[in-house]
């Protein structure tokens, strides 16, 4: 009986997990191939303060997760999880939206924080897709003894007959080299969430995918051995 419960419960648990995946298409500026960035300012121009904080902060969260995976997998996962030495800073902390900063003031802030790269994350589109869950029913029963006679009792469970919405979000991402002012790397992405995914799940998937792509392109500074 316990095995039956586990067989039913585990797939249900997996289904209920907040899940999101990101597809990304990117291109590297081959005219400046030898740049290695270490301190990157993340800029997400949302009017909503909470969404901006979450978006810009998600890269530090993903970096911790990335380095944790490197520690777990060690040499076995070295090809994917390389030892990088990178810091992501939120622009809302460095350039809070209380003032309009001049170009000179902005440059001074960047020098003060030793920022060598700027990652701009811009929302392009947001929508949901709907999937219809067909109505279904399942009847189960059992035999019971009442007053010396055997009787069968059945139970019918109905489910479905409704729509579930799945979020989709499209971003354009650009990474600038501060020293030259040139675009070093750019990408477009589509992140898809299941019916239980919220914005945090979507942006966490996006930031991890971006981080992995930047590692693949060998743009980030590596840890000293």
Image (cartoon, rainbow, N blue to C red):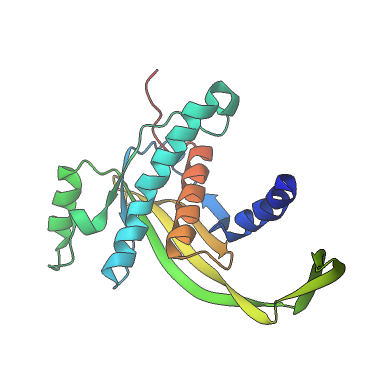
Q: Quadrant of residue 190?
A: bottom right
**Residue that protrudes farthest toward the top in the picture:** 225
Q: Quadrant of residue 194?
A: bottom right
Q: Is residue 38 above or below residue 57?
A: above
Q: Nearest the camera: 108 or 141?
A: 141
**Residue 60: image x %, image y %?**
35, 45
Can the viewer see residue 30 in this picture?
A: no
Number of numbered callouts drawn: 0
Residue at 41% of width from left, 29% of height from top? 222
Horizontally, residue 5 falls left or right of residue 24, namely right
Can the viewer see residue 224 in this picture?
A: yes
Q: Nearest the camera: 210 or 160?
A: 160
Q: Is residue 115 above or below residue 183?
A: above
**Residue 6: image x %, image y %?**
68, 48
Residue at 33% of width from left, 37% of height from top? 38
Q: Is residue 70 above or below residue 199?
A: above
Horizontally, residue 124 falls left or right of residue 95, namely right
**Residue 197: image x %, image y %?**
51, 64
Residue at 70% of width from left, 46% of height from top? 2
Q: Is residue 174 above or below residue 6?
A: below
**Residue 74: image x %, image y %?**
52, 24
Position of the C terminus, as image quadrant, is top left
Residue at 12% of width from left, 57% of height from top? 105
**Residue that protrudes farthest toward the front in the picture:** 147
Q: Nearest the camera: 46 or 198?
A: 198
Q: Nearest the camera: 109 or 181?
A: 109
């Amino acid at each position: 009986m316990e095995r039956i419960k586990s067989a039913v419960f585990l797939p249900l648990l997996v289904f209920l997990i907040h899940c999101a995946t990101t597809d990304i298409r990117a291109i590297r500026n081959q005219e400046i191939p030898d740049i290695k960035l270490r301190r990157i300012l993340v800029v997400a121009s949302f009017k909503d303060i909470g969404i901006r904080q979450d978006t810009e902060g998600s890269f530090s969260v993903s970096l911790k997760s990335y380095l944790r995976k490197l520690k777990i997998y060690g040499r076995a996962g070295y090809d994917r999880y390389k030892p990088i030495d990178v810091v992501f800073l939120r622009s809302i902390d460095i350039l809070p939206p209380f003032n309009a900063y001049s170009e000179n003031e902005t440059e001074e802030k960047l020098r003060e924080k030793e920022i060598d790269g700027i990652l701009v994350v811009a929302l392009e589109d947001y929508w949901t897709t709907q999937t219809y869950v067909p109505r279904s029913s399942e009847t189960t029963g059992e035999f019971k003894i009442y007053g010396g006679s055997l009787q069968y009792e059945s139970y019918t469970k109905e489910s479905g007959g409704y729509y579930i919405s799945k979020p989709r979000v499209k971003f354009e991402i650009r990474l600038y080299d501060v020293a030259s002012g040139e675009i070093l790397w750019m990408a477009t992405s589509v992140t898809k969430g299941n019916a239980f995914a919220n914005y945090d799940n979507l942006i966490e998937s996006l930031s991890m995918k971006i981080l992995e792509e930047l590692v693949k392109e060998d743009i980030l500074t590596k840890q000293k051995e």
